[in-house]
Image: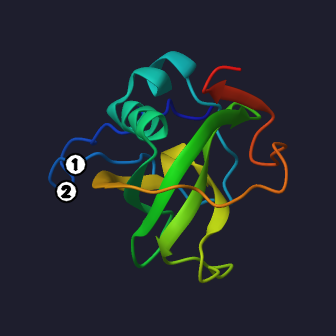
Amino acid sequence: MPSKKQPFGETPKMQRPPTLRGLSGKPADRERIPDDPEAMESSSGYQSIIRAIDKSSVLAARYRDDPDEREFVPTRVGTLKGSYAVEAFQVKGFSESGLAMVGGWRCFVLDELKYVRDVDRIAHPGDRESEQTSCFDTVVYPPA
């Protein structure tokens, strides 16, 4: 049976100094354990993302095993098959798929974001082609 996930944004004991931290560090190709909605939505990392959505502010974080930080403006949080994800417009930083000069839309699995921090600046996401998203099947925040 899969082990229970640690709440997103909580620093595991006996690891690096406390910062807002994504969680598990598990390989992306492993079968995903559905997130516990109560634990996820009450975590410090989730609350930081919600504040950034409300203020259109920029966050910085590392994603999966990226060598460098990405900076992004989160716009929506949702779930896909029980896992929380954030739809965001990336404005700076690493991307395996490449990043246009003006940024690009990305989907980040929340528990694979590490060292989430506020960059203390406001930015506006790029234009959307559609309000539809392939990032998740259910929008959690902002409410419709």
Residue nearest the viewer, comparing 104 with 137: 104
Q: Is residue 116 above or below residue 64?
A: above
| Residue 28, x across and y down, in percent | 62, 59
- SS at badge 1: loop
- Outermost residue, left side: 17
Marks counted in the figure total 2
In the rendered structure, the answer to whether residue 43 lies left or right of residue 103 reads left
Expressed as whole percent of the image width and height from the top left, the position of residue 99 reads 62, 79
Which residue in the structure is indicated by mark 2?
16
User: If the image is split into quadrants, where does the N terminus sit?
Assistant: top right
**Residue 29 locus on image (x, y percent):** 68, 60
Snapshot quadrant of residue 11:
top left
Q: Is residue 50 left or right of residue 107?
A: left
Name the amino acid type tagged 1: Thr
Compared with 110, 96 (above or below) is below
> Dot 2: few (<14), some (14–19), or many (≥20) neighbours within 10 Å?
few
